[in-house]
Amino acid sequence: MTHVLWQGNWIIRTRMVTGLVLFTYVFFHFINLGLALFSPAAVEAMQSARQIITRSVLGGVILYSALILHAGLALWQLTRRRSWRMTWNEAVQLGLGLLIPLQLLRHITYTRYAHELHNVNDEMGFILVLMWNSPSIWWQALLLLAVWIHGCMGLHYWLRLTRWWRRTQTSMIGLAVFIPTFALAGALSEGRRIYDLFVEGSQRAALMASYNWPDQPTFVSLRENENLWIGLFLALLVLTGTAVLLQKALRKRRAVRITYVNGPVVSAEKGLTLLEMSRASGVPHTSLCGGKGRCTTCRVFIEDGLDALHPPSDAEARSLAAVRASSTMRLACQIRPTAPLTVCRMFRPDGRTTRAHASQGQERRLAILFLDIRGFTSRTEGQLPYDVVFLLNRFFDAIVPAITGAGGHVDKYLGDGLLAVFDAPSPARSARAALNAAAAIGTALRTFNARLEEEESPPVRIGIGLHLGDLVQGEIGSADHAPRTIIGDSVNAASRLEAETKALGVELLVSAAVLDAAGFTAPESALQSFQLRGVAEPVSAIATLRAEDLFDLLTAQHEQHHNQHA
């Protein structure tokens, strides 16, 4: 198992490195094309500069090794796939990856190959004249888009979990759209210009001489080589497909029998996890975290065959311990059956109850606001219950619109406090909405306290904790009475931050996770670290004396941080 994991990691890293090499080459190639919008001289100058690197011995070895390794490892991984079930995005990236060589081999034939063997000057004008006024120009435009989309998807899958990528994703999408558009516009502009010169005829002879235009026998030779290389690639695809079918047949002979209590009996390929076996066989199997071993909703009782399973890994053991699972319970996403197994799924997504599948929970990364009134018990001591309820309702009427107006909603009222969540498409938007709500609550509180002062009543003091993290949204309760709510360690962290505001004498504590997601950078000196009860890791947060001054404080500290690093 360790050897398989190491081999898989080596392949993934190699494909990542080679993909980055190819993506870098493509990026500068596209910029080169786009420069035609400014002048032909700019195109030629950049092409000459690029070729100093790409046509050197070292540059050529790196570039073509990356191309061969990237394509070869992709085909190798195809032969090793256990299941062909994939998301739509994965299918698109795979399809584009298989189509690219069919056009790329043609492009290489008439550029690098023609230059090395027939001394053709393969500058941009030569290629554009060669393709212009024929279907080749459109095929090459499609190649340009296919390569770019394939590369951008790979880059996104690699970086999507990093914090900086999430912050800059909107800008990156804009750049990803601009680059191929810029390149296509430049190619069309230069192609029209250079082809018009050929049609007009006065400069045709000089241009053909400068390009060392191939004669008819040379074109025949180039076409033969093009067909040979494409034929070899198609043969590799056929061999890959044959290897896939052979391995599938062999694995089928070594299939393992899985019996689901209150479900079907299936034969599945060895080597897959039980969750993958369920999905490949069309057996409904809940897994809210997607098979990462975090949510434990895929867990099963092992009715028969437990002794044949490998022991739980440390991560699986921790997850099972967290839900106090019995010794006969395992996570379907972590076990790989090699012998017949009888299992009972803990959660049934197939309609046994009246709940929808979504009611079992959805993992999200959102901002949470926890608010509490300071000293409320002593303030209302001796008052009639009606007066207490009246004061609370007046208070909530005053501050809740600040939450809903920012895009949040109150998840639950907690006597003299509340828990609000900011349900947004991205953590960044959720964090910004939470910050806006906190500042607006501060303003609403000042107005509310002014009215209390006019009535000669003491002001209301509050504490607010703002945090952002992973949580689960789901319907919790009996089947007929299950309000939608949120649970998770992030909710506890927001509550504990709110409690810390009392000791500090401030209205608001905002965690660094919220600030980072919203795009604010606070200096380290402004952040305080809190070891919160029930929260494993320390939480860094910034304190604000008055919530309504939040953005003034953040702006000042952002400028201070900028000046420190200027």
Image: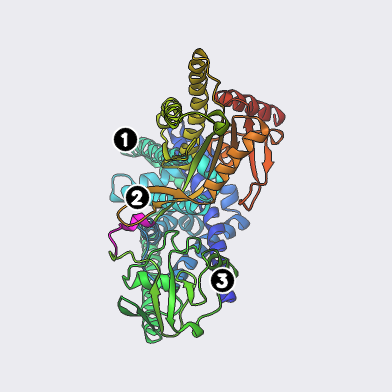
Query: Residue 142 shows which numbered tag?
Result: 2
Which numbered tag is attached to residue 60? none
Q: Earlier in the sequence, mark 1 or mark 2?
A: 2
Residue 60 quadrant: bottom right
Q: Residue at x 34, y 39 (%)?
A: 195
Q: Pointer 1: residues within 10 angstroms few (<14), some, or many (20+)?
A: few
Specify whether 447 is left or right of 252.
right
Residue 485 position, x and y percent, is: 41, 47
Amino acid of disc 1: Glu
Disc 2 packing (10 Å; few <14; some 14–19; many ≥20): some
Circle number at residue 5: 3
Judging depth in this view, the residue of 221 and 233 nearest the camera is 233
Q: Is residue 410 magenta?
A: no
Where is residue 31 drawn, in percent x and y? 48, 40
Q: Quadrant of residue 407?
A: top left
Quadrant (top left, top right, bottom left, bottom right) of the C terminus: top right
Q: Earlier in the sequence, mark 1 or mark 3?
A: 3
Residue 356 located within the stretch drawn in magenta: yes
Q: Mark 3 belongs to which amino acid?
A: Leu
Closer to viewer: mark 1 or mark 2: 2
Q: Residue furthest top?
A: 454
Dot 3, how many residues are within 10 Å of its Cα: few (below 14), some (14-19), or many (20+)?
few
Image spot of residue 402 (x, y percent):
44, 28
Look at label 2 and name its amino acid: Leu
Label of residue 200 in the image: 1
Residue 294 percent location from the top left of the image: 50, 61
Query: Which of the image's four quarters has the N terminus?
Result: bottom right
Q: Which residues are magenta?
A: 353-360
Q: Are marks 3 and 2 in contact (CB under 8 Å)?
A: no
Instruction: Return the residue nearer the eye: 455 or 361.
Output: 455
Between 212 and 317, which is closer to the camera in this rendering? 317
Among the two numbered marks 3 and 2 on one chain, the one whose residue lies closer to the N terminus: 3
